[in-house]
Image (cartoon, rainbow, N blue to C red):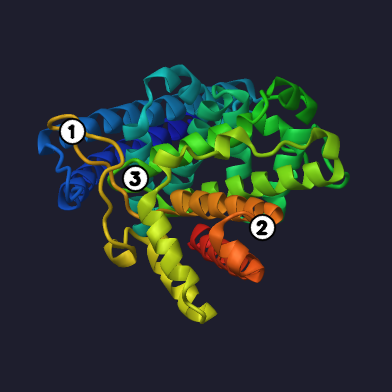
């Protein structure tokens, strides 16, 4: 009788989940078609195909999880033992079996499913889907290169101090006393293990490439994530400066991943930065920075001519002022001006030696204000 009750409950849950899956699939298709990219309208048939494929995969995973848990609970009931399979392990098994077939479409669809269940206040299914989402991300992270895995852990933290703790541990191999270790999330026994596997500048190169890939898209998919990645890059730069200060023998002129070729300097960011530097009111500067960094603001600066010739039919990449480009431009200008001040070179500095110090002070103020804006963007709910 107990086994029949368990079976009935599980089958009812599976039937209800399948019905919800069908209903949410329709909602997702409508949502995807109602908000197309203004410049890249996707084929509705392709959208439906992607959604259907992701929904089918999700349905298989939910059925597999419920089936495994049912078998384990039914066996435990018959043998009068405690169930051996926890829900987390059932989820892990389902994900590991299918991890090679999961793609960005699956995660995007899963995010929409979670949003729909949250709106409908279906707490049980929402918690199951969120646990599934976390396990998918965990399994993907375990298959990343060491630097990407370390960045994944750092990116999970909203607070700066927590991110710095992770970055220090990864860069130097120590775990500060009294701080919970997250090495297990990386699938390693100690921070030293991953630190020894990292190539020089690997963290900076990895986060720089991730930022560049996101900002090269016509539409930034997640400004919150982009803002946090830019903050992580700034924190890595700060840690590098800290190490150079305390260990001058290991000092380098500049992290290679942050150097700009002159022809690749984002000209629109340079134009916007010049305008911001001329604003004396800090509140006005913060307002300008906020508008430019939280959206693709066409009024930030005039559109510039392409720095590289485009092939026939090739689409012009976006040159909007975006967080990564702006902070890299700001840093490049600070570095160049510091060198000019130190050596007293440059016609303006020869006429007025104090001018360089004044501009550096304003650049420092803008840097702090931009960091504060990014921190608000990355921590927004």
Q: Nearer the viewer, residue 237 or 224?
A: 237
- The residue positioned 28% from the left and 40% from the top of the image is 21
Residue 130 placement (x, y as % from top left): 47, 43
- The residue positioned 65% from the left and 49% from the top of the image is 235
Residue 271 placement (x, y as % from top left): 38, 60
Q: Disc 1 designates what residue?
A: 314
Residue 324 placement (x, y as % from top left): 47, 49
Residue 58 placement (x, y as % from top left): 35, 31
Q: Nearer the viewer, mark 3 or mark 2?
A: 2
On screen, residue 177 above or below 323 = above
On screen, residue 282 above or below 225 = below
Q: Disc 3 designates what residue?
A: 113
Quadrant position of residue 206: top right
Can residue 121 be seen here? Answer: no
Relative side of 114 to 146, left or right: left
Q: State the count of labels.
A: 3
Can residue 154 be seen here? Answer: yes
First reached walking from the N terminus: tag 1 or tag 3: 3
- The residue positioned 33% from the left and 53% from the top of the image is 320
On screen, residue 78 above or below 343 = above
Q: Nearer the viewer, residue 359 or 25?
A: 359
Q: Find numbered disc 2 in the image and state the secondary structure of the residue it sits on.
A: helix
Cα distance between the residues tagged 1 and 2: 42 Å
Tag 3: Cα neighbours inside 10 Å, few (<14), some, or many (≥20)?
A: many
Q: Nearer the viewer, residue 331 or 140?
A: 331
Relative side of 331 to 165, left or right: left
Q: Find numbered disc 1 in the image and state the secondary structure of the residue it sits on.
A: loop
First reached walking from the N terminus: tag 3 or tag 2: 3
First reached walking from the N terminus: tag 1 or tag 2: 1
Quadrant position of residue 273: bottom left
Q: Disc 2 designates what residue?
A: 341
């Amino acid at each position: 009788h107990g086994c029949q009750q368990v079976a009935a409950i599980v089958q009812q849950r599976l039937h209800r989940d399948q019905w919800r899956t069908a209903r949410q699939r329709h909602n997702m298709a409508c949502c995807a078609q109602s908000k197309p990219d203004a410049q890249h309208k996707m084929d509705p048939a392709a959208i439906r195909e992607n959604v259907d494929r992701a929904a089918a995969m999700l349905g298989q995973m939910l059925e597999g999880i419920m089936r495994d848990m049912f078998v384990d609970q039914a066996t435990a009931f018959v043998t009068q033992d405690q169930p051996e399979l926890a829900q987390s392990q059932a989820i892990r098994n389902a994900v590991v079996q299918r991890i090679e077939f999961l793609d960005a479409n699956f995660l995007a669809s899963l995010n929409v499913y979670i949003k729909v269940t949250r709106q409908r206040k279906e707490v049980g299914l929402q918690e199951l889907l969120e646990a599934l989402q976390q396990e998918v991300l965990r399994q993907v992270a375990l298959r990343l290169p060491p630097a990407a895995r370390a960045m994944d852990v750092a990116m999970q933290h909203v607070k700066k101090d927590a991110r710095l703790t992770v970055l220090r541990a990864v860069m130097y191999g120590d775990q500060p006393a009294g701080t919970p270790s997250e090495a297990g999330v990386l699938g390693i026994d100690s921070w030293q293990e991953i630190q020894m596997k990292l190539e020089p500048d690997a963290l900076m190169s990895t986060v720089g490439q991730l930022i560049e890939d996101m900002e090269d898209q016509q539409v930034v998919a997640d400004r919150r994530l982009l803002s946090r990645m830019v903050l992580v890059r700034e924190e890595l730069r700060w840690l590098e400066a800290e190490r150079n200060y305390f260990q001058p023998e290991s000092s380098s002129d500049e992290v290679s991943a942050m150097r700009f070729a002159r022809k690749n300097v984002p000209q629109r960011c340079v134009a916007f930065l010049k305008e911001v530097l001329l604003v004396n009111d800090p509140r006005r500067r913060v307002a300008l920075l906020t508008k430019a960094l939280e959206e693709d603001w066409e009024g930030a600066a005039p559109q510039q001519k392409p720095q590289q010739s485009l092939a026939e039919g090739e689409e012009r990449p976006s040159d909007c002022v975006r967080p990564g480009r702006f902070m890299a431009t700001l840093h490049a200008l600070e570095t160049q001006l510091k060198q000019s001040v130190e050596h007293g070179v440059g016609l303006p500095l020869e006429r007025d030696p104090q001018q360089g110090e004044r501009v550096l002070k304003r650049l420092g103020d803008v840097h702090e204000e931009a960091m504060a804006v990014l921190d608000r963007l990355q921590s927004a709910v």
